[in-house]
Image (spheres, rainbow, N blue to C red):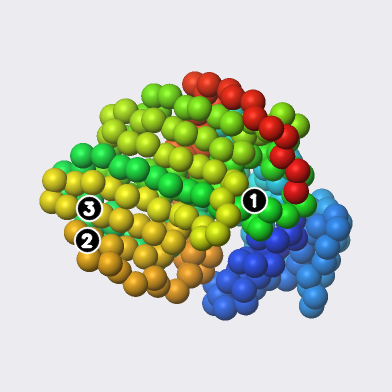
Amino acid sequence: MALRLGIVGVGKIVRDQHLPALAASGDFDLVAAASRNATVEGLANFKTLEALLAEGPEVDAVALCMPPQVRFAAAMTAIAAGKHVLLEKPPGAGLSEVAILNEAAEAAGVTLFASWHSRHAAGVAEARRLLAERRVTGFAIAWKEDVRRWHPGQAWIWEPGGLGVFDSGINALSIATEILPGPLMLRASRLLFPANRHAPIAAELTFGGIPGTAVFDWRQTGPQIWDVAVETEEGPVLLTRGGSCLSVDGKLGEAMPDREYAGLYAHFAVLIARNESDADPRPLRLVADAFLLGERIEIDSFNE
């Protein structure tokens, strides 16, 4: 029997990814939505999560897709009501929020899932398997996209807690922490802040432990770049197109169909069935370290 799901925060990512994945899912039945400014046709719609829980159809779980600055309070409300919770990435505006939610979910006996969707890209699992058998010597991440294309009119990403370029860069970090066979430690970072923004538009990171670099940039025009390149003594392992294409030892692979959110919801269903949680904080911890260690560089104002 499918689990009854409510979705909270109906924005671009929900319409582009969550709704199509749920329409094809045999694990979940989407029965309600809550959003201040939008509705989903064919569902019971409410302005707030509280109204959904009080007045709407019964739900077993909720997917929280509002901006991270307001996600913690909603997650605590859902957990207190005994609902399983999926958190869009990033799972919170800070590490303390994620730790508290983990403790609350465990105490309530419900599942908490921090959904790093890029880990479900087609090439990621095989890259992890290959790298577990090889001797990794370094890595380089390039994650460059046009913020005007992917976050049009989304003012929250530029506010404190919105993460700026790390909203997308954290996807690369979620892949790196998944596939590399050892812990990542940030050594240094350079953060480029537009004069009129509270969050960076670009970042350069340097890692120790496994030596590596990452370049995130929201000013990219032309082809968008989402690459994770890993050097090993046996040869290179390269993930491109956000992890959907895996190339090994110089042999170019083919991009596989996008099933990130299908995989995400399938994993959520498994976690619920097992009465387990999965709220890995490592990608967010690296972002926090980038801000702690970051050399702040002010650049010209940015306007859409």
Q: Residue at x 26, y 43 (%)?
A: 181
Query: How far separated are the C-alphas under marks 2 and 3?
Result: 7 Å
Circles 3 and 1 in contact, beta carbons < 8 Å? no
Residue tagged 3: 236
Q: Is residue 11 toward the left or the right of residue 216 in the image? A: right
Residue 249 appears in which quarter of the rendering?
bottom left
Q: Is mark 1 on a helix, strand or loop?
A: helix
User: Does dot 3 land on a helix, a strand or a loop?
Assistant: loop
Tell me if residue 61 comes above or below residue 156 in the rendering: below
Q: In this view, does 30 lie above or below 271?
A: below
Q: Quote the CA–CA distance across marks 3 and 1.
A: 30 Å
Q: Which residue is drawn at 45% across and 74% down?
A: 257
Q: Residue 238: horizontal and vertical position, in percent?
A: 30, 56
Closer to the chain start, of discs 2 and 1, is 1
Position of 107 compared to 134: left or right? right
Tell me the residue that label 1 is attached to.
147
Are the residues tagged 2 and 3 within 8 Å (C-beta)?
A: yes
Q: Is mark 2 on a helix, strand or loop?
A: loop
Seen at 50% across and 42% down, the residue is 216
Q: Are discs 2 and 1 less than 8 Å apart at CB? A: no
- Asked whether residue 79 appears in the rendered view, the answer is yes
Mark 3: amino acid: Pro
Above or below for 300 versus 59: above
Graded by Cα atoms within 10 Å as few (under 14), some (14 to 19) or many (20 or more), the crowding at tag 1 reads many
- Residue topped by disc 2: 250
98 or 205: which is nearer to us? 205
Instruction: Point out the image quarter for the N terminus.
Output: bottom right
Q: Camera-side residue: 304 or 90? A: 304
Ranked by sequence position, the earlier of labels 3 and 1 is 1
Real-space Cα separation, disc 2 to disc 1, in angstroms:
31 Å
Q: Inspect the image, locate mark 2, and give the three-letter code of the amino acid beneath it.
A: Gly
